Image (cartoon, rainbow, N blue to C red):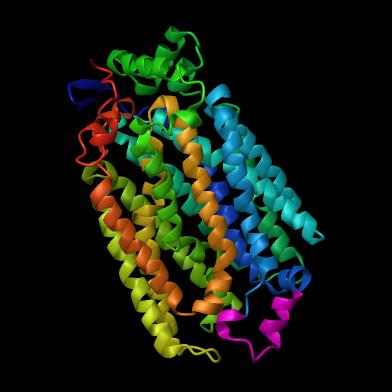
Amino acid sequence: MAVKSEGVEYNGKITWFVLLSSITAASGGLIYGYGTGVTGGVASMEPFLKKFFPEIYRKMKEDSVTSNYCKFDSQLLTSFTSSLFIAGLIASFVASPVTRSFGRRASILIGGAAFLAGSALGGAAHNMYMLIFGRILLGIGVGFTNQSVPLYLSEMAPPKYRGAFNFGFQLCVASGCLIAFLITYGTQKIKGDWGWRISLSTAAIPALILTVGALFLPETPNSLVQHGHDREKAKKLLQKIRGTENVQAEFDDLITASEASRTIKHPFKKILERKYRPQLVMSIAIPFFQQVTGINVISFYAPMLFMTIGSGVSASLMATVVLGIVGTTMTVLSSLLVDKVGRKIIFYIGGFQMLIPQMVIGVIMAAKLEDHGVLSKRFSVSIVILICIYTSGFGFSWGPLGWLVTSEIFPLEIRSAAQSISIAVGFFFTFVIAQTFLVMLCHMKFLIFFFFGAWVAVMTAFIYVLLPETKDVPIEKMEKIWRAHWFWKRFVNDVQDYDS
């Protein structure tokens, strides 16, 4: 099978070698999804709250004065949640030189090992210091893996199927969240401390799979050439990955991109140049928009949000399981379509699918949920259904595409730095939302849904105006899409054509 792009023909097919390698690497998404999804589950368990957050436990059980919207407002609780993400932010910048100098596999291995240590410490925690330090180690783990895994997948995948391969990461993120929801739903019925301890320590299982698997992963041909390894060895690896001897066109582009990359000594400084303006903007805007969809409000605080509208702990956790199934299913569907219909149409569909439910939820909560009391069963079920529709929209669009687009649009010379910026921006705004959401919920109340809905409208317009379509464009020829774009061409008209 050949992929033709602007006169350049790449050969290749999906081989078992590339499939198994990509599945192993994509499991890095499991640890991120599990670390995110388990947070809200354990934070709604009474033994966990009694041990670490007694003030919140008191409000839940005894306080009839505090508003429904404010019962979980605790800076200590948000610090527990957000410590993972501030650690991930810092780690992503450390991961950039590691990924660039030692390869993608080294970063994946470090990330898996750090997450493994953090899950063990969290499950064994006896005080807040152990709990927070365990979360910091988890953050270091996801900082390294989120920086390196999407790059690894984009570089290994055949160009025609790059979208589907990269979606494997988001599929694992969604699956990790679902597994966390299922485990917390089961363990919340265990008496004493064992429920939350099992939930936190089970994160060690996907971390162990990733860490052991990383020992056997091949490095990408892009990375081998970039680091000056034997070119013939890199070419043979590319032939093995593509399942064909005829890889000369792709290998020539890889060599050209690598030679340009080796002239760059300071990639973080290089990306500030005018000709890289579109990549810099996208590396900041896309992860920012991905977070202000409001999805992490659902991931972190769904059980607490459902308890706010009147559900019990068990019913709240069951609702999050349904959300996990919906999100995972839609990511699978999107992976089957992304390389056929393109990235932009999926962004549009997902944006509409997220916007409408948020507006309706805001209206229902404004009209029916007061500071005290609960919603009727009919309206509670309606909100759960609307949140499912919203979650399916994210799982179909911004969830997987946020990772895919930012991993495929960067030229090799700035790829590691740009990916670090993208991951760091994502972690920073995840941290900000995690740290402020409970305060925002307490003060903004139902308006919080209109706030996130407005951002969904803005980001959909941004995609329509400023993001060119990347479907079927080989990763080392991606500079052409910016040169042809009505707006970005004014910034990149001095980029040399690799074919010239």
Vertical position of residue 402 compared to residue 434: above or below? above
Q: Where in the figure is residue 290, as x and y percent of width and height?
A: 42, 54
Q: Quadrant of residue 457?
A: bottom left
Residue 66 in magenta?
yes
Q: Which residues are magenta?
A: 54-70
Residue 64 part of the magenta segment? yes
Q: Would you say 141 lies left or right of 477 here?
A: right
Tell me, yes or no, if residue 124 can be seen here. no
The residue lying at 55 percent from left, 59 percent from top is 432
Residue at figure coordinates x 20%, y 34% from the top left: 484
| Left or right: 262 in relation to 138 | left
The quadrant where residue 349 appears: bottom left
Residue at the far right: name it.
Answer: 126
Q: Against 371, is 161 above or below?
A: above
Give x and y (percent) for residue 68: 57, 84
Q: Tell me which residue sits at (42%, 81%) in the image.
A: 381
User: 67 or 234, which is in the foreground?
Assistant: 67
Q: Is residue 483 above or below residue 466?
A: above
The secondary structure making up most of the magenta span is: helix
Return the residue nearer the eye: 421 or 128: 421
Q: Name the side, left or right, on which 477 lies relative to 95.
A: left
Residue placed most toward the observer, 354 or 158: 354
Q: Quadrant of residue 47?
A: bottom right
Tell me what residue is drawn at x 65 percent, y 55 percent: 83
Q: Is residue 353 above or below residue 363?
A: above
Inspect this view and state whether residue 437 appears.
yes
Indicate the position of residue 352 as horizontal and vertical percent values.
Answer: 28, 64
Give how far across and how far down residue 1 sits, in percent: 23, 25
